[in-house]
Image (spheres, grey):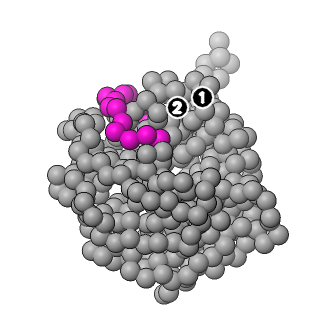
Amino acid sequence: MVKSLLFLLVSIFGWFHSESQSTHFVYVSHNLPDSEYGISVYNWTEESGELTKVNQVAEVKTSSYLAVNQVDSRLYTVNKEGIQSFKINRQSGELTMINAVDHVGKGPCYISISSDKKYVLVAYYVSGSFASYAISANGGIGAAISHIKHEGSSINRSRQEGPHAHMILPAPSGDLVYVTDLGTDEVKTYRLGDTGVFSKEPVSITKVTPGFGPRHLVFHPSLPYVYVLAELTGHVLTYEYHPELGITKKVDEDSILPKDFDGFNKSADLHITPDGRFLYASNRGPNTLAIGKIDQESGALNIMSNESCGGDWPRAFEVDPSGKYLLVAQKRSDQISVMKIDSVTGGYKKTFDIQVVKGPQCIKFLSR
């Protein structure tokens, strides 16, 4: 009896201690035809880099991408069926569906939230378009407000036969949103009005080298530079940008592939540490992450090395909010690899792997 009571007390203390150390929830999307759960929820412990599963969400069977509203505790996701909104329990991390709406485009591949938190923005790869949807007071999603379709193509006939909008992301300040189009080899900026309507014409159009295929972009956290990932050729392009004018000047262009690599590759994702010193970019093919150091005056990128991603097919990854760790979603090996970042060199070392539901595709943090 005494031993049982002691065991119970130790178990409760251990659970409480583990919970009390957790600083964030981590949401992981899964996107395979035979997936049972579209989203998994984890506890993240910043001090130790520990990732432990909380629960899984079966209301959606697949999820292509996630967006998290840190202020209002809401999560939004896209899949082939539509756009879904969830309320987040800030104590448990649990998700409760609010509603779902149909798409106005085809092939949803990215979702983000406008700077004023009034609209969700979705990029559609197949139809080469993007759209805005209103967010209601309770966090639900309304019907589409604005929908723009790109036109054009580029030199890669198998991948660039038409427009393929791949990402839509609000600028850090101002009312511009950036749209990468892999099919037309362009990055376009549009103004998003107070009513959620996009400007009919782009504010700026940036043409990348033909055949590059711009996929994702990331803004420097404190300097006026934006970095664009070219999926088809494995490059990162650095540009200056202005909050009212969009992209204004090209700074440089760097290969992110291993120097001795000569096989099939699709570059996938890129992120910058919170201090703005290091950039990482993932390559599906050689299964590596390129490590780049950012010049804090010119914004120029110096690719220092290419290291193993620790698994197979790094579809996406995230830098944790402290800047101490990388969490890599290995889509084909069904795992999340946790890497400890060296704050001096920018290099990293794997601490452990977490086996997950099939096909992890996107990772997002929410502070507790």
What amino acid is labelled 2 in the image?
Thr
Give the quadrant of the N terminus: top right
Instruction: Name the spot of residue 188 as percent of width and height, x first.
Output: 38, 65
In the rendered structure, the answer to whether residue 346 lies left or right of residue 189 reads right
For this orientation, the residue located farthest to the top is: 1
Dot 1 lies on which element?
loop
Determine which of the numbered discs, if any, sits on residue 33 in the image.
1
Q: Is residue 316 visible?
A: yes
In the rendered structure, the answer to whether residue 320 lies left or right of residue 203 reads right
For the residues marked 1 and 2, what is the alpha-carbon distance in whole angstroms? 7 Å
Instruction: Name the spot of residue 353 as percent of width and height, x first.
Output: 71, 44
Q: Residue at position x 56%, y 73% from top?
A: 209
Residue nearest the observer in this picture, 282 or 8: 282
Q: Quadrant of residue 347?
A: bottom right
Residue nearest the observer in this picture, 194 or 58: 194
Q: Residue at position x 33%, y 61% from top?
A: 177
Residues in magenta, as a range: 92-108
Determine which of the numbered discs, if any, sits on residue 62 in the image.
2
Q: Residue at position x 61%, y 60% from top?
A: 156
- Above or below, 354 against 173 in this view is above
Q: Is residue 48 visible?
A: no
- Above or below, 99 against 162 in this view is above
Callout 2: 10 Å neighbours few (<14), some, many (20+)?
A: many
Does the magenta-highlighted stretch encompass residue 137?
A: no
- Marks 1 and 2 in Cβ contact (< 8 Å): yes
